[in-house]
């Protein structure tokens, strides 16, 4: 307790401690972990042969911890839903678009350090927010352990900021997302039927997405619309289109 | 303690409890979770509109918990390795081939219930072992919590059965795995150069894998060998070739 008073009111880093306390609801133990979580590789320095002190390693860890906490949440929230549904719901919750939004809601954008000359406001910077969110989860996990991180995520973050039941209803519309992105970036997009691979039943539809003449994704399904949807999803992934423009 | 004596020596399920204790090193709390973990969908019954009491939901949960435990292990074991290396190492450890092997080493095959008439000894059944391993992790997590599961995985399972440093050295050779599988199954396989998509630099190599005339994977890279490797990896995934034949 006395240590927390020192951190919040006397320490040279008291402003940083206060910001973090406002966001997280607790005073961090090891502040270095949090500083690392908010350090984009564009401002990181090498700590040993080629490895930088950026947030990428923490992001790897946080992504895994987040995946586990959300898996349990969904497992218990939907006792009569199959594994396919659970997987899909988790993808929606931890999608880059959703984590970016969450990151913004929590105000993490004020804490992230990155080289503003190198990064323009682009899809790339978009993922910077979600990446920092995951890295923060990794930092909390190392600082406070699994149970603490789980409580924080469920009670403070998911409950307040994630509308699971709305996510359940929304179907990510990759086709319109792709088309909007192409319009916005002056690119031509078309969906073309392609031949089925030999040996595959003729009842299948194959569709490929062409963006400025380059094939960006192929989808196959028993109906044309689903095949287009799949192809658009792959194209969005390929082109790193994360957010609705 | 008295309860454990009952479970191991007096309960009608004492044989089952004993088998589990031999494998896991502890006496399970809620035995129903473990029974579910070993129940393949081929012998599961519907518990509510279309949802079966198979191990698939537990597998979803266990996969996530396992991913998190292994992420932390690697994060701490390799403090100077980047996120790409950590991701690759985790993929190797939790690969279906590796989990199948682990499952066999632990003797889970004796506990898994499945309909032997429906499933032949095939790639499909191969994944049955690894799936049950993940479901078991899910069951232990629900029964005993994260810390317990983490200790069990690290101290009893990974330490004894997973040679991380050998895995670090082994590069999964998808090309030879694919070729062996095709020989074994009397299929013709070839690697063909294909045209690069328009707009892509001419320095890139595109290679596609044809198996019995069907395109099973395309790889692109700056050198031909890597492009072939990527194409073979995709083909292995597409054809569900999990294990070395």
Image (cartoon, coloured by chain):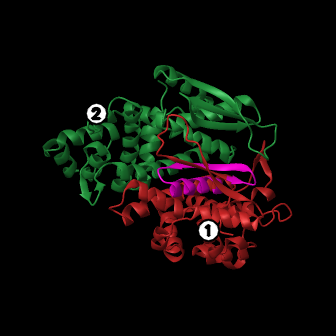
Chain colours: A green, B red
Per the image, label 1 sits on a secondary structure element best described as: loop
* Residue B5 image point, x, y percent: 63, 77
Per the image, label 2 sits on a secondary structure element best described as: helix
Q: Which mark is residue B14?
A: none
The residue mark sitting in front, 1 or 2, is 2
Output the chain of dot 2: A
* Residue B120 image point, x, y percent: 81, 64
Q: Which residue is mark 2?
A: A110
How many C-alpha atoms fall within 10 Å of the one at disc 2: few (<14), some, or many (≥20)? few
- Magenta region, residue range: B210-236
Indicate whether A221 appears above or below B6.
above
**Residue B212 counted in the magenta span:** yes
Indicate whether B187 appears above or below A132.
below
* Residue B124 image point, x, y percent: 73, 60
Output the chain of dot 1: B
For the residues labelled 1 and 2, the Cα–Cα distance comes to 47 Å
* Residue A59 image point, x, y percent: 39, 49
Is residue A32 in view from this perspective?
A: yes
- The residue nearer to you, when weighing B233 against A233, is B233
Q: Quadrant of residue B128?
A: bottom right
- The residue nearer to you, when weighing B150 against B100, is B100
**Residue A174 counted in the magenta span:** no
Q: Which residue is mark 1?
A: B28
Q: In screen coordinates, is B66 left or right of A17?
A: right
- The residue nearer to you, when weighing A44 against B195, is B195
Instruction: Determine the residue positioned at 79% across, 49% down.
Output: B46
């Amino acid at each position: 307790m006395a240590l927390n008073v020192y951190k919040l009111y006397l320490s040279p880093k008291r402003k940083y401690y206060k910001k973090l306390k406002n966001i997280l609801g607790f005073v961090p133990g090891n502040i270095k972990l949090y500083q690392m979580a908010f350090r984009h590789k564009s401002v990181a320095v090498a700590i040993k042969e080629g490895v930088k002190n950026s947030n990428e390693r923490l992001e790897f860890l946080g992504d895994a911890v987040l995946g586990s906490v959300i898996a349990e949440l969904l497992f218990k929230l939907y006792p009569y839903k199959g594994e396919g549904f659970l997987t899909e719901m988790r993808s929606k919750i931890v999608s880059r678009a959703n984590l970016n939004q969450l990151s913004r809601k929590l105000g993490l954008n004020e804490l992230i350090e990155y080289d503003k000359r190198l990064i323009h406001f682009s899809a790339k910077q978009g993922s910077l927010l979600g990446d920092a969110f995951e890295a923060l989860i990794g930092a909390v996990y190392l600082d406070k352990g699994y149970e603490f991180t789980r409580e924080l995520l469920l009670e403070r973050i998911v409950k307040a900021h994630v509308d699971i039941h709305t996510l359940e209803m929304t179907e990510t519309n990759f086709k319109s997302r792709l088309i909007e992105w192409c319009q916005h970036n002056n690119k031509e997009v078309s969906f073309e039927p392609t031949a089925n691979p030999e040996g595959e039943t003729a009842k299948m539809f194959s569709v490929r997405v062409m963006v400025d003449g380059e094939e960006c994704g192929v989808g196959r399904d028993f109906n044309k619309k689903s095949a287009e949807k799949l192809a658009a999803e792959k194209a969005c992934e390929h082109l790193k289109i994360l957010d609705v423009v």
